[in-house]
Image (cartoon, grey):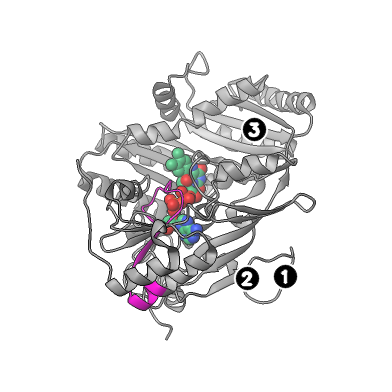
Amino acid sequence: MPLPTDYAPLSPDLAASLAALLGDDAISHDPARNAAHAGDWSEAPHVQPPIVLFPRTPGQVAGTLRLCHEHGQPIAVQGGLTGLTGGATPQAGEIVLSLSRLNAIEDFDTVGGTVLVQAGVALEVLQQHVETEGWAFPLDLGARGSCQVGGNAATNAGGNRVIRYGTMRNLVLGLEVALPDGRLLDLLGRVTKNTTGVDLKHLFIGAEGTLGIITRLTLKLSPRATATTVALCALPSFQAATRLVRELRRALPGLSAFELMWQDFMTASCEVSQLRPPFGDPAPVYALVETQGVDDAADRQQLEQTLGQALEHDIVSDVIVAQSLDDNHSLWAYRESVGELLGRLKPFAAFDVAIPVARMGDFVQQVGARLAERYPEPRHLFFGHLGDDNLHLLTGPYPDAADLHAMEAAVYATVGDYGGSISGEHGVGVVKKPFLHHSRSADELTIMRQLKAVFDPRGILNPGRILDGAPEPAR
Ligand code: FAD
Ligand code: ZN
């Protein structure tokens, strides 16, 4: 099916000014090339942008914003386009600004363990670059090959190792941000401690490009672990998983991941990735456990010992401990099949809700049973990052968009009833905007609109993402 297109021409004035600022080769009018910028991984309808801009420097990003601000031209900001909420998907009448050419690693402090990078550096490129000097950038997620560090900060990405290293917010020491009026705000923060008023960088982390465009980041590294041990556990119940994670946190200071997968997820994962089921008998819940340290043999022994005790206490019913790097990859493969599942279950809804752990088991049971009854055809796959209350539900396919929306509304209302958050890590974008009131009070939403008015009074930057309507001036 051809993509919807929108070829509304720019004002000639703006087009000439952009060409003078960026150069003709940084402006694509080519429909074939622009088709790759029509949308992210979510179900938000794709719209082919008439023009895609590829600035090469932070100054050019700021200059582009200034021109668009002056002309009232709306812009969609794009990182690696792996987002799952439609935030980077252009809307009719918008032009696209891609960060892909801001991809330099500008400075690597191998003594202090920090890097200064441009926003368009791919996460995996950064991970591999710093490893050469014995450091690690610990944020990690399935989309690592394509997502960009700027996009990670804009969505406050979480991923697999939050239990140990925190979310992107914990890893950003400083930012440089281009504002809609053309100012380039230097918040790069070269010192660790700085108690001099409001820490402005936090306003831009998780704001999904609605307040400014992140152009450069100073990021905190961790010493690279030289030993990684992985185990996959079959568990008799969700309650057992909560006991196991508590026990592992106590016994294993190097615990770096605790990923939960319910049985239906494991079955679907084996199907799409053509993997053998890990155990002879299926279990209600599986936990993928990872530790990072410095001594392979000692770390594995400690993990085996702790899991052995869990087996004795019936917290775990079966366990596989990886014996090699290949084994590590094979066990992670069950969890990493999400990319293929997303491709297979379209049109889908990919939830990333946060639910208090004490109530998460009930939530899964209640929502799973309701969905199975009401929508018997689609798959309903639960998995998540138990250490940080973050639960994923991938459900699809829903050929009828009305069904998809009704199902989302029901799930998000239940999230509200459970005192949870409608997004633990992917953000709101356009996909979750109608449900934001389940997680944010009317006062919070008003203040968010007022902040939007401070930074982007003409509403040209990612308009209609997170919040509807025009920016609201402060009273
Ligand atoms: P994009 O999709 O391009 O943009 C996302 C949002 O950020 C948009 O609103 C965009 O306008 C804005 N934006 C992008 N760059 C900038 C910038 N420089 N300045 C200001 N705004 C900007 N997410 C997780 O948190 N944890 C996971 O475990 C996880 N796993 C995933 C697995 C798969 C297979 C996929 C496809 C996605 C997954 N995601 C996950 C979601 C996604 O990868 C993250 O949200 C990622 O951080 C988005 O980065 P991006 O560069 O692709 O951003
Ligand atoms: Zn996740």
Q: CA distance from mark 3 to mark 1?
A: 34 Å
Horizontally, residue 52 falls left or right of residue 185, namely left
Q: Residue at x 31, y 63 (%)?
A: 94
Q: Residue at x 68, y 34 (%)?
A: 291
Residue with the most extreme top position: 280
Name the N-terminal-most of marks 2 and 3: 2
Under 8 Å from ligand 1: the CB of mark 2?
A: no
Q: Is residue 313 magenta?
A: no
In the rendered image, the vertical position of residue 293 relative to residue 437, given as above or below = above
**Neighbourhood count class around disc 3 (C-alpha, 10 Å): few under 14, some 14–19, many 20 upward:** many
Looking at numbered disc 1 in the image, what kind of residue is underneath it? Asn
Is disc 3 in contact with disc 1, using a CB cutoff of under 8 Å?
A: no
Residue hosting label 3: 290
Residue hosting label 1: 194
Q: Secondary structure at mark 2?
A: loop
Residue interval drawn in magenta: 67-87
In the rendered image, the vertical position of residue 101 relative to residue 184, given as above or below = above
**Neighbourhood count class around disc 2 (C-alpha, 10 Å): few under 14, some 14–19, many 20 upward:** few
User: Is residue 426 visible to the viewer in this orientation of the structure?
Assistant: no
Horizontally, residue 339 falls left or right of residue 162, namely left
